[in-house]
Amino acid sequence: MILEEKYTLSNGIEIPKMGLGTWFISNKNVVNAVQEATKIGYRHIDTAQAYRNEKGVGEGVRSCGLKREELFVTTKLDAGVKSYKKAVSSIDKSLKKLGIDYIDMMIIHSPQPWTKFHGDDHYFEGNREAWRALEEAYKAGKIRAIGLSNFLKPDIDNIFESCTVKPMVNQILAHIGNTPHDLIDYCSDNEILVEAYSPIAHGELMKKAEVRNMAEKYGISVPQLSIRYCLQLGLLPLPKTANPEHMKNNMGVDFVISKEDMETLKNIEPLKDYGDASMMPVFGGKMNLKSLFKMVAKQIKG
Ligand SMILES: NC(=O)c1ccc[n+]([C@@H]2O[C@H](COP(=O)([O-])OP(=O)(O)OC[C@H]3O[C@@H](n4cnc5c(N)ncnc54)[C@H](OP(=O)(O)O)[C@@H]3O)[C@@H](O)[C@H]2O)c1
């Protein structure tokens, strides 16, 4: 059963092969989502400072009835934190908000602040500073594993140049219709596990006839096909839902996509439109104050 399977990170720590995404689940609703997910068998929860729900995730973790060590909790250092000093206090704030003694994994959310996402400025120095703070917290036992998110090859190389602890993961956008094979290969060549965020393309894959037809052929749902696709590529998918029926559906991935169908899915026409979410930097949108405000309002509403 997928929820019981694990990958081993480069530092020897085990991480459940699939996690529950919590982006756009409010602080209030995420408590119940974590409780339901853990009842179903989920052991890995993905949050971020930017999701404004660390408090609720922590409450869910503490009240779900499982021992702390049975769960794997990931959070992310805000994309705007690009100094050592700010990173140190930010890590401590996450620990406090989550209300837990240690964080299983903390990753830098993005090499650039959201308004400059994947722009020309790589914030090399700021990322090395943030990384130094993560390394210190790791060595102090506050965090069991540290990593990156949205880092491209030059951003990863920048960390390699000065790190004393190598990044253990890179969490990137990877789904049917958008699979950055070169970056994935570069990460695996360097013992960096790739986590696939938005594995269902934020829900958009369900609208794609080609994907729907293939799911139908296997007698499964589009999310199941999407999650299985990531797993067969050796990635760690993080499907988001607060709906227990969807949580149960998403764990039904004990089937195999044929080699031929994997090739078809790898070569499917790239997805260009992420619907309402297209304004998000991670989906190619430009973040301005108006969209930032809209995003925060949506997050608070849950
Ligand atoms: N590091 C980063 O920069 C970054 C960026 C984006 C995302 N992430 C992480 O990745 C996670 C997942 O990405 P995402 O939230 O963009 O989207 P996603 O997981 O690709 O898709 C979520 C959508 O799929 C629907 N869904 C899920 N399971 C379903 C099922 N079995 N049947 C029908 N619908 C289903 C959800 O609806 P319901 O909610 O109604 O179930 C929601 O609309 C995030 O929550 C976050 O933890 C990280």
Image (cartoon, rainbow, N blue to C red):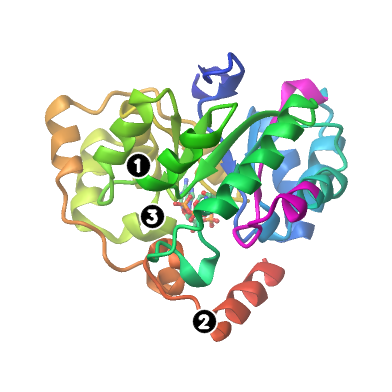
In screen coordinates, is 246 left or right of 212?
right
Residue 11 position by quadrant: top right
Q: Which residue is mark 1?
A: 226
- Amino acid under disc 2: Asn
Residue topped by disc 2? 288
> Label 1, label 3: how many angstroms apart (C-alpha)?
9 Å
Mark linked to residue 196: none
Q: Residues within 10 Å of mark 1 (few under 14, many from 20)?
A: many
The mark found on residue 201 in the picture is 3
Mark 1–mark 3 CB contact (< 8 Å): yes
The structure residue drawn at horizontal position 13% and vertical position 40%, both measured from the top left corner, is 264
Tell me how many marks there are. Answer: 3
Q: Is mark 3 within 8 Å of ligand 1?
A: yes
Q: Residues within 10 Å of mark 3 (few under 14, many from 20)?
A: many
CB under 8 Å between discs 3 and 2: no
155 in relation to 273, above or below: above
Label 1: element kind: helix
User: Residue 77: image x %, image y %?
Assistant: 66, 50
Q: Eyeballing the image, is 52 above or below 12?
A: below
Q: Is residue 29 left or right of residue 277?
A: right
Q: Which residue: 11% across, 30% down? A: 260
The numbered mark, 3 or 2, whose residue comes first in the sequence reads 3
Instruction: Reply yes or no: does residue 117 show up in magenta.
Output: no
Q: Is residue 80 magenta?
A: yes
Q: Which residues are magenta?
A: 68-88
Nearer the camera: disc 3 or disc 2: 2
